[in-house]
Image: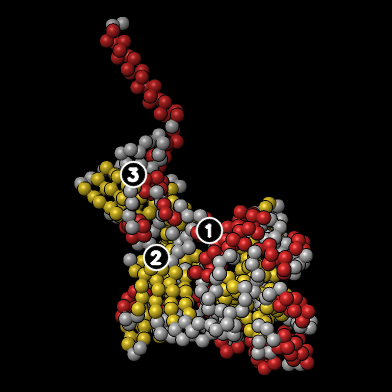
Amino acid sequence: MSKRKLVLSVVTAFFIIILFGIVIIEPTEIWNRIKQNSEELKGGYSDSVVYDGNHYKLLHPIGEKNGSLYISLPDLEAITSVKTAEEENQLTIRYEDKKLTYDNGFIQECSLTKDELCGYETIDGTIYIPEVSVEKYLGFQMGFFYDKQTNTVSIKSPEEQAKKAHDQELGSTIFVHKENVPAEKYEPRSGIYLGGYVLQDEYIDTSMNTFNKLTGKTHASYFKYVGYGKPFPKEWAEEVIAAGGFPQVAWEPNNGLDEVKDDEYLRQFAKDAGDLNVPILLRYASEMNGTWTFYSGHSEQYIEKWKLVHDVMEKDAPNVMMLWNVFTMPESTIDEFYPGDEYVDYVGVNIYNVFYHNDKIEEKSDFEDPLRLLDYVYNTYSHRKPIVIGEFGVTNYTVTDGKHHDDFAVEKITRMYKHLPELYPRVKFIYYFDVNNLVNAPEGRKINNYAITEKKSILNAYAASIKTDQYLSKVEENQAESETYSFRDFFFYYGGELYVDYKFVRDYLNMDVKENSGKSMQVAFNGKSIDVKQESLKIDKAAFFEKREIKGLPLGEILDSFEVDNKLLDGNLHIHIAN
């Protein structure tokens, strides 16, 4: 064989080996490329995206192909503020100091054997970018908001990813500042009364003084459950006072509402409460919106009995604050039990972050945000009444999986207590439910341990979070006449505009709102009226993968039309308006 033929044979053999090496070693990559070119983009996702905690209505739907998500370039530009430049056959997308460049629709530095997706998709003239490229070259993180079952895509900026978990995806807040707002009984204007429940914490012998010492702060209030028909707990109330606080009484008609009458028992209970001569938060018949109480499902009778109790307390115990307190869910039944503003001093809600719902391993709920669990009650009622978190508890151990979840407890407790004073200024009380239900709950409810005193990491997280002066240890006197309101989550961005639920415009800005049609609403204020476009969007509720429809109005246009003072500061909108 000649030397030339030998060289030719060697070269040919070399290329054959390479070809077979690619086919043998990397068949998945080649098959993926074939599939990528042959499959259509599939839909089925929400028509919104959550970016750094805020909702954005999409111009084009999210697509999926080959297991990868695709977002349209116009949406990527509108949502994340990336900058694009096109020259001949080259497309460059920039975010801060990062860039993604396509030449003839292909990333030049992309390796077929390492990256499944090296190009973009074009549908009806619109470019769609795959998530792997958005993440690798621009630094964003794409996934699902809360959980994959929501079908809502979440995008986090590099800046958001750098934050601690309890600080991520807070989103923006709309603040409304008002003057000459009358305060409710004992309402603080400089912070939140710090409260707790320790009567079943055997680890500290149910001692309020020990709890104060361990947490490093005197709690302004403690609560106790009292069944209707039992006398007012005078001795316990005096112990609360001796520990530096004032009592909350969770008074429950567990034999049904028929036993609630204008009789000697009710009058004596009120007299004993009045004789104490300190503030008393009376949480009468709470969690009525659920199905688990003996007074659920009877809203008319409930309101009738509530008004009776209110009137007796108003006459015989003027130191009593009437707390109307619901559970986080179901939302649909809440408002039918509301007695009316003149019969309520405070509106409350009980919030629990559990690792699983209903002791079912398939109902994992570790993604739920304690702040968003507050939003419905807060947004619906805080314009009319100050808010109380009557109970707050977080799972640190559950029998559902037999595991400890200390990091989960630390994250949720820190998130709630760190951000509550700043983002939710209308919250005036919060009570931590310091109980190990594995020991103290009735049969059928021995599922979660919520106690914070048994584990040092959880206790330290709680103690660190309540150190701020915004958590109050004493009753505040001489309340300020100005008040700040806030509104969260029930708004979205679309086409560069902020659309807020129409109820905010009606309830917080005190404007008249009328629906013209499904496409516009009339807004009137100070003798002037305008018609504005309505945009709707379904966003995710805080739990159980349910959706909430937001009927949004363009807030900027409304504020400008009525010359309402407003300012954007650190991503939050501040509005100043006369009460």
Instruction: Give the distance between the C-alpha atoms of the residues marked 3 and 1, in whole angstroms.
Output: 36 Å
Q: Is 497 on the left-hand or right-hand side of 260?
A: left
Identify residue type, mark 2. Answer: Asp
Q: Is 225 on the left-hand or right-hand side of 50?
A: right
Residue 44: x, y in percent? 45, 58
Identify residue type, mark 1. Answer: His
The secondary element bearing badge 1 is classed as helix
> Above or below — where is 178 with respect to 400?
below
Tag of residue 509: none
Residue toward you, 465 or 381 = 465
> Which residue does the image show at 56% across and 58% down from the upper left?
367
Residue toward you, 480 or 579 = 480
Q: Is 185 on the left-hand or right-hand side of 45?
A: right
Residue 99 visible within the image: yes
> Which residue does the image show at 31% across and 50% down from the upper left?
94
Residue 57: x, y in percent? 39, 64
Instruction: Give the distance between the C-alpha atoms of the residues marked 3 and 2, in whole angstroms.
Output: 36 Å
Residue toward you, 454 or 241 = 241
Q: Is 193 on the left-hand or right-hand side of 139?
A: right
In the image as oriented, which residue stretches furthest toward the left?
A: 88
Residue 363 visible within the image: no
* Viewer-nearest of discs 3 and 2: 2
The secondary element bearing badge 2 is classed as loop
Tag of residue 570: 2
The 10 Å Cα crowd at callout 1, few under 14, some 14 to 19, many 20 or more, is some
> Above or below — where is 372 with respect to 346?
above
Q: Which of marks 3 and 1 is nearer the N terminus?
A: 3
Q: Earlier in the sequence, mark 1 or mark 2?
A: 1
Please say if the residues under marks 3 and 1 sit with CB atoms less than 8 Å apart: no
The 10 Å Cα crowd at callout 2, few under 14, some 14 to 19, many 20 or more, is few
Tag of residue 166: 1
> Which residue does the image show at 47% across and 73% down from the upper left?
487
